[in-house]
Image (cartoon, rainbow, N blue to C red):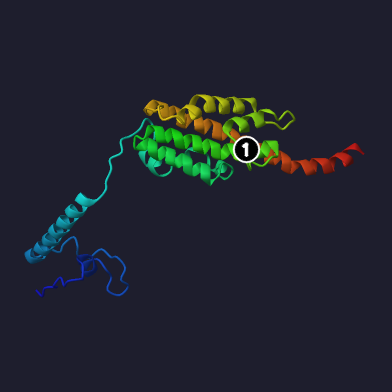
Amino acid sequence: MARTPLRKGRPIGRLHFRDKQTGQFQYPDDAQTKQLEPWFVWQIERSYQDFEAVFRAEVQAAATYWVPKRGSYSTRDLVDSFERSFLPELHEIIGQTALSEYRNAGRCFAFGLWTAAGYHSCRAVEAVLRPYYCEFTGKEDKEGKTWHALIEGLEGVKDEPRPADKTLFYLRQLKDNERNPLMHVRVVLDEQDADLLLGSAKIVIVHMARETIALRAEKAAMPLLQAAMPSKAS
């Protein structure tokens, strides 16, 4: 029987698992009955040994990490896509900056960087708080106001529509008990602290996003209501 030599640069897959006309992958018809000759098996074993040696050398120099499971979170979601914690319909309102910060918070949490996870959580809240302030006060945030000034400005809105008292309560609690202390180097979070802050940040962000959606819908409907009022009166 004539041998088919394994020429350099021509992998086994191309020799035996490709249709010669189309080039598409094709499982050999005689794979169930055909027996490989010893010389061919030896070449496969030699190729595998070469691959194993190269792979072993590359793995030793590669940066690899083992990430344990954190609570009930999916490790893959924590590392790559923690922003999926928010419903897709909220993403546009929350904004890419806040989503990116919350993704970084999840990544830090996965790798055991508890204080960094809390820090990014607060940054995610702030990225939503500033446009939330602009929506309800009608003012621009040109001066880069502090959280204290932003919350006071929101609390000063007396006419409807106004921010929900519950949202303002959560914001002030987060500022006083989590965000402000975190700015000091002496404060270091542990896993439980970081987990609680991730949840608290998510609650505040969702409340602000939902209120913003409702406010924009109300503003969009206002001209229609005003146009309908005269005809209704008549």
- Given the current orientation, which residue lies at the most extreme right position? 234
| Residue with the mark numbered 1 | 132
Q: Position of residue 143 (x, y in %)?
A: 62, 41
The residue sitting at 64% across, 25% down in the picture is: 165
Q: Specify the quadrant of the image occupied by residue 24.
A: bottom left
| Type of amino acid at the residue the image marks with label 1 | Tyr
Give above or below for 228 relative to 171: below
Badge 1 marks a residue whose secondary structure is: helix
Give above or below for 6 relative to 165: below
Q: In this rendering, would 146 be left or right of 36?
A: right
Give above or below for 60 relative to 106: below
The residue sitting at 28% across, 70% down in the picture is: 19
How many callouts does the rendering have?
1
Q: Residues within 10 Å of mark 1 (few under 14, many from 20)?
A: many
The residue sitting at 19% across, 62% down in the picture is: 31
Q: Position of residue 193 (x, y in %)?
A: 41, 26
| Between 160 and 33, the one nearer to me in the picture | 160
Q: Position of residue 149 (x, y in %)?
A: 62, 32
Q: Which of the image's four quarters has the C terminus? A: top right
| Between 124 and 223, the one nearer to me in the picture | 124
Q: Which of the image's four quarters has the N terminus? A: bottom left
The residue sitting at 56% across, 34% down in the picture is: 206
